[in-house]
Amino acid sequence: MSLDTRPADRPASTRAATERPRVTARRVALRRLVGTGLVALVVGWSLVRSLSTDGALVNTGGLRLLGRLLAAVGDPATSPDFLRIVLDAALTTVVYAALGTAGALVIGVAGALVLSDATWRHPPGRVVGAIRLVLRGMLVGVRAIHELIWALLFVSVLGLDPLVAVLAIAVPFGAQTAKVFAEILDAAPRHPVSAMRASGARSAAALAYGLVPAAIPLLLSYAFYRFECAIRSAVVLGVVGVGGLGQEMVLSLQSRNWDEVWTLVAAVVVLSGVVDVWSSKVRGDLAVVSCSDWSGGSTGTPRGNRSSWARWSAVFAAVGLVAAWFASGVSWAGLVSARTRELTVRLVDDLLPPALPPGGWSVLGGATLDTLAMAVLAMVVAVGVTLVVGPLATRVRPVGTDEGAARLTRAPRLVGRVGARGVLLVLRSVPPTVWAALALLVLFPGVLPGAVALGLYTGGILGRLVAEAWESMDTRPRDALRAAGVRSGLAALVAVLPPSSHQLVTYTLYRFEICVRDTAIVGVVGAAGLGRLFAENLSVFRFSAVTTLLLASFAVSAASEVLGRRIRRAISA
């Protein structure tokens, strides 16, 4: 008698419930065709809306001003007095970014301890669960509002105080940091902290010695990444008038001192380049290879190849933070003064209840549609920049072992890569407000100048992300095809194009979510959309309408974030 050890047949209903549905190549092709058609339809609608204006699009008078600006590129301002102003403005920008990042880390740590499941000894009860849900919603709302909008609100309470720039960076960045820090803590190994808790250790000691050490490389890595982003935000906040390179650049543009503009642009590019290189080196030593890991939402994995660069950078950052605090003149006394409390209460009373802006729902709906059209066209421009400049900025690993041929092409490739990366650095270093001011010299106010400005700025960021992602791709399929006799171009097309297009689509969707939020920047300086309405109503102290515009901006940002996340998950699946 033999014993049958084969598993019994499962009922058909059970098999249907547990087995994944088969996805055929025809279905995949159909999905791609439908997706491409929908994208083309949305882009077409955005283009029609941007061109549907009663007046002319091109400002011929502004073309002469733009020509003068370009003619001054070879003759920047180099007087000692102005260079001292530039140096002071650069130091102010770094100080604001450093203090804002420090504030964001404090908010991020506090928020992460509440949001992370790993920090709780037992599963949270209903009360704690409700508190976490409310906190999560508050953080989503806080980071949905751009830091420039936060700065404008803080100015109405604190005036032109340096604390405005620090808080404007710390508040939205802190909300984002809390989310990422909570994900890092949840992804860390829990065996040490569980063992310490089981042995009777207190919660604080168990977290400090059992959970944080495994997560500290990624936490520090993200902190330096946030500082890199804070430099760009500190330049943008110059529009408010709190100082820094951004303010000097706006003043030079308004006074049409084109030679000063180019000197300030060079200072912004140099500062951004130094911070980019430093931050990338620290992240590479600590945990992640490139900023594309953080930007794409990946928390990475510590690789254990840390060097002394990261340790000395941490010491330098701590010392520099103390120096920045004393050099900034920032005082927390303004937050607790009687005048601040009075103005805050008055601001809250003015903000509530919400009211429609002049023109009612039609004006609000039109501004919302302009915001969406601007973001879509900006991403079209950004993708175009990425496709043109991104491949040139990517480090190409040679195929085969022909050292002579590789040596002949190495120098031209290096020159091209350095030039392409320089172009991307300039595009993302110059703030969108400046790009918008330049676009408004040539184009009349509307959707189009805002889309061009945001597209150039986003193209610099997207091109860098995609180039770094392409550099980390596995090239063994290409090498195998090349070894089998396939031509180099065809091998690269077949083996590299499909995964590279996946990276491009993923990062494009990610940047679109941020681009919707960034439309407020160009709107403040005269482009269309909700940002323009916000600036107009804030300038006449119509705060009840400002509240409605903030709610509309939050709804659009949240909807784009949810939609983008679902599309990325569908693409990954």
Image (cartoon, rainbow, N blue to C red):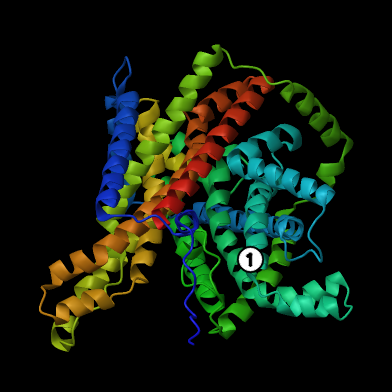
Query: Tag 1's secondary structure?
Result: helix
> Residue drawn at (81%, 43%), measured in percent from left and top?
334
> Residue drawn at (70%, 42%), measured in percent from left and top?
138
Residue 122 visible in the picture? yes
Where the C terminus falls, by quadrant? bottom left
Nearest to the observer: residue 326 or residue 142: 142
User: In this rendering, would 442 be left or right of 360?
Assistant: left
Residue 442 visible in the picture? no
Classed neighbour count for the residue bearing mark 1: other residues with Cα under 10 Å, few (<14), some (14–19), many (≥20): many
The part of the image, by quadrant, that contains residue 100 is: bottom right
User: In this rendering, would 459 be left or right of 371?
Assistant: left
The image shows residue 318 at horizontal and vertical percentages of 70, 70
Q: The disc labelled 1 sits on which kind of residue?
A: Ile
The image shows residue 417 at horizontal and vertical percentages of 28, 67
The image shows residue 420 at horizontal and vertical percentages of 30, 61
User: In this rendering, would 205 be left or right of 181?
Assistant: right
Residue pointed to by mark 1: 184
The image shows residue 158 at horizontal and vertical percentages of 75, 37
Q: How many marks?
A: 1
> Residue drawn at (50%, 57%), measured in percent from left and top?
14
The part of the image, by quadrant, that contains residue 402 is: bottom left
